[in-house]
Amino acid sequence: MGIIYCPECREQMDESVARCPNCELEMTPGKITLAKSLHSQRKGLAALGIGAGAVLIVVLFFGLFFGFGNTTPEGAGNEAKKKEDINEFWPEVQTAAKAKFPQTGEPASEAIFTDGQSTENGQSINEESEGFYKITSYVDTKSTNRRYYFDCTATKEGEGSWSIDGVKFGERQELDEK
């Protein structure tokens, strides 16, 4: 077995372990594939060397200075893919968060989730690498007028299949009555 990097904390670890020794992330087959990809990327970048890095910098400089002739808005394709991914995994995020909802006497069934697309009120969904997202979001409760913030990750396991891990609730905020 070889050395890989944990897709959650990026620490180096042996490929044969069931959980990351640093962050305790369970290593499923999809996560091991992602970790191998991260390891390959790191090895590939190290192999480039200073000469290749210098050539890359020159090419990028001229490309930015003279333009690459791209008429598509920057990042348009990535944003469309991100929205597609979010729409695919967001129901699973809601299910995982409801399962970990704080024991406050408020039923998880009363939880009101965001749609996953908004960046308001502290919500963020960042793609750390292809098929791996770090999420900060929140749940509002109607009966007590409170907002509960939570963090988690979403990892693509296969076509249409996502793994939601590390759901942790943190800050609670009282909402203004409307």
Image (tube, helix red, strand yellow):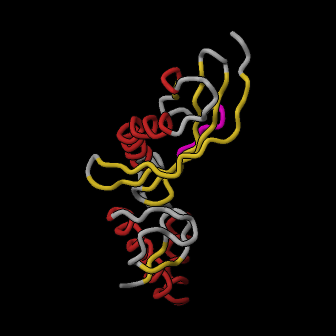
In which quadrant will I find the N terminus? bottom left
Left or right: 114, with 35 as reference point = right
In which quadrant will I find the C terminus? top right
Q: Residue at x 64, y 32 (%)?
A: 148
Q: Residue at x 47, y 86 (%)?
A: 48
- In terms of depth relative to the viewer, which is nearer, 101 or 36? 101
- In terms of depth relative to the viewer, which is nearer, 170 or 61? 170
Residue 161 vs 31, above or below: the answer is: above
Q: Within the image, what quadrant is residue 16 found in?
A: bottom left
Image position, residue 147 (x, y; %):
65, 28
- In terms of depth relative to the viewer, which is nearer, 27 or 178? 27
Image position, residue 146 (x, y; %):
67, 24
Residue range in magenta is 121-126
Left or right: 121, with 92 as reference point = right
Q: Residue at x 53, y 46 (%)?
A: 167
Asked if residue 6 can be seen in this view, the reply is yes
Give the farthest residue toward the left.
159
Asked if residue 126 can be seen in this view, the reply is no
- In terms of depth relative to the viewer, which is nearer, 112 or 21? 21
Q: How many marks?
A: 0
Give the farthest residue toward the top.
178
Residue 79 vs 176, above or below: the answer is: below
Q: Residue at x 38, y 74 (%)?
A: 36
Left or right: 77, with 140 as reference point = left
Q: Is 165 within the magenta?
A: no
